[in-house]
Image (cartoon, rainbow, N blue to C red):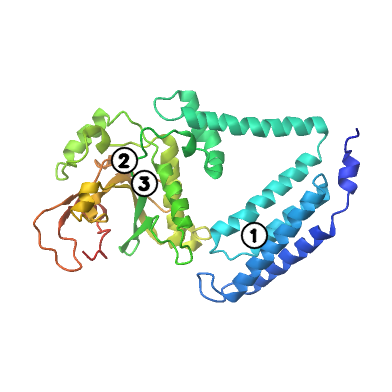
Amino acid sequence: MGTDSNSTKLSTPPTPLSWIGLVTCGIAAGLQLATAGVGNPTGSCWTGGISVALTVIGLVLAGQGVATRPRSVFVLLIAALTSLLGYFGIREEWDSVRLVPWVMTWVAAVAAIIISLPRTTQRVVVSGIALFHFLGVLSAITSPPPQSWLSLTAWTYIFRPHLFFCYTNNAYQFYSPEPGPASLLWFCIETKDGHKSWFKMPRKPESALDPLAIEFYRRLSITEASNQTYNNGPSPQQLERRRIASYVPHHPKANLQSECRPLNEGARRVVASYARHIAYLYDPNLDQNPESDQVKSIKVYRVLHEMLQQEDFKNKKDPYHPSTYFPYFLGEFDAKGQMTHESYSDPMLYWIVPILRRESITIQPGKSNDVDNYLAQHAGSDPFEDRNP
């Protein structure tokens, strides 16, 4: 039984399917780049549909070429280039779909590098990749409290990006007995002119083109990354600062330990990156001219949405009433994702900022005057301004 030599791998010509796929994705990329900005921003322009169809056809043809000659370096490199062109052949707004050819580009490129190596080196590299993955799974299992310093450090600084990309992090932290309420993220953005607005994720539906709410559940898994906390309750310093904020009552439905949920190092990094991303959404030119950013500050709240019981539905309780939301203040950030000095001294940092229901109140249309909304006081803006009871 012979083995493939490096010269054979490099001299094996690509199949006609590989070339056809490359040309097809090239046409799709050219069509999309030539018509960028044409049509409405939701991607319903006819050119967007044609370019996506051509991209899919090109990727299938390139994949068939790889299946025919999987050990050809040239075929894998052409597949990588085809996928890269497929990435540019999809509208920027279709970020979830666009991610597929981007990942395929890297997979094909890395595969081409591995194939070009000697057989022994190939085995070492592939074994190393598999070992890295399963060590990451082990860190995901052992990282929830109580955990060792080594496990938490490995998960936070080494394995977390890979596990989040594969979504093999949360699934390995076994649910017992039942998962709790979903984590939402609310951002109160203040611009330099003093205007404040809210950005909430996820919201349902994210798009009229997504009837199965796939985008909603994908973003729900993103927000869950902010739910990495220390479970030992508030420190004496945090308790002392909370006493200073006596104007904000404690939440009657939460005990002292669940009222304060300090984030661990990994979650703090994630929240800071989210705040920086929101700043870019509001000021796309922030990279080119950091000094002219329009965002003054971003207050971030992790919000738990209460799960109603059968008795609540029987009594016709509104599942979206403001009092069903439990917001935790995660800090105030600048446009670069750096927490402000005021946040470190804020007595409500990592505490619930309660929204409490007042009974026997006559509700005026378009007003949320049936609640004591301390979140609106803390943020300086009401997140339920558009609420219509």
Q: Is residue 120 above or below residue 195?
A: above
Label 1–label 3 contact, CB within 8 A: no
- The front one of 343 and 78 is 78
Mark pair 1, 3: CA separation: 31 Å
**Residue underneath mark 2:** 344
Q: Which residue is mark 1?
A: 87
Identify the residue at image location x=35%, y=32%: 230
Please name the residue shown 25% across and 38% down the image: 259
- Marks 1, 3: nearer the viewer: 3
Helix, strand or loop at disc 2?
Answer: helix
Of tags 2 and 3, the one toward the viewer is 3
Quarter-of-image position of residue 163:
top right
Query: Picture coordinates of residue 374 (x, y %)?
Result: 20, 51
Q: CA distance from mark 2 to mark 3?
A: 23 Å
**Residue extending furthest left?**
360
Tell me the tag on residue 183: 3
